Amino acid sequence: MKWKQVKQAIAHLGQESIRTTHNRIVACGVLVSLGFVPYWLGDLIFGTLHGAASLLMAVAIALGVHLIWQRRTQLEKLEASPEDEFLGHILIIGCVLLTPFGFILGEWAQRIIWMLILSGIACSTWGIAFFRLFPLPTFLIFAGLFPSPTIVAKTLWETFLPPKMLEHLMAWGGALGLRAIGQPVEANGVVLTLPGGSVEVAWGCSGFDMATIMAVASLVLGIFLKQRASRVILMMVIGVVLALLFNIPRIMLMAIAEARWGKASFEFWHGFWGGQIFSTILFTVYYYVVMAIAKHKNKKTA
């Protein structure tokens, strides 16, 4: 019975997709977007396994869609003007023609095409007013689809700040921590040297990627919990600061592992499982800190 209902629903969608010119154009855009889904799922799986923010991006998209669904009654009242419908159709058709470049140029081109197709569908179906009435869901969906946010953040950081600034800061913090526990260490730029071995604090060990992930996680969590903008910003700042602070003990541990315990130990703490252990500790501490602040502020406003 259920399979019969599914077939009926599919048949109904197929009939509706070709009923009008608008429906045919939207259906074409949707089909093209579906062609990018396997690549997106691959990035979601492999990115999450390697500590990227891919899962958080998917959560942001899901939250944006959920917020729109909650206000679907208001959405049903919107109607696109002929000008908005024409603009949306131009966006969809133009992106459909550019689809081959998405497969040739890779992820960033696919994400941009996907975002423009969705913009075209929204504009041609509900009009420009959609973006004015649903700014937060639009931001969440587009933020979730944005290609390589950590790479973009890294580019901006390196453009406006001195070279290797964060790496030097992390090396300095790691050296202070090692001396505090009685380890003889020499810090030369981004290199920490102990008797028996040395470690270079490269960009991947600077804590920037985790700080970016914590900022995104804080934003999504704050919106999900329906916090005020000021409190969301505070949560983001706390997440970034904790990520950078927790990165210092990790650098210390990797330096000791390289100097004392051998290459296998260093590779463990430097690799996937070591990163997951520190991430779990970081998120646990972050959760309790943020929840304590939220409860404290709720008591003040009560």
Image (cartoon, rainbow, N blue to C red):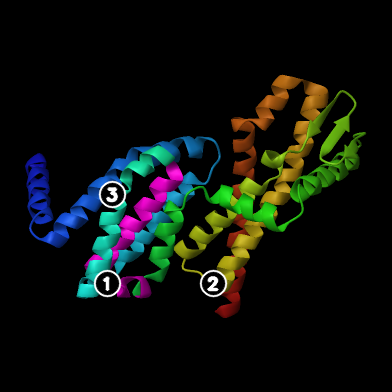
Secondary structure that dominates the magenta span: helix
Amino acid type at mark 2: Ala
Which range of residues does the magenta coloring cover? 106-132
Q: CA distance from mark 2 to mark 1?
A: 27 Å
Q: Secondary structure at mark 2?
A: helix
Mark 3 lies on residue:
97
Looking at the image, residue 110 sits to the left or right of residue 85; the answer is: right
Residue at screen point 78% across, 34% down: 200
Residue 149's place in the image compared with 40, above or below, is below
Which numbered disc, 2 or 3, marks the residue that appears first in the sequence?
3
Name the secondary structure under disc 3. helix
Using the image, tell me which numbered label, if any, was put on residue 91: none
Q: Amino acid at mark 1?
A: Gly
Q: CA distance from mark 1 to mark 3?
A: 23 Å
Q: Is residue 69 visible?
A: no
Q: Quadrant of the N terminus?
A: top left
Read off the residue under disc 2.
229
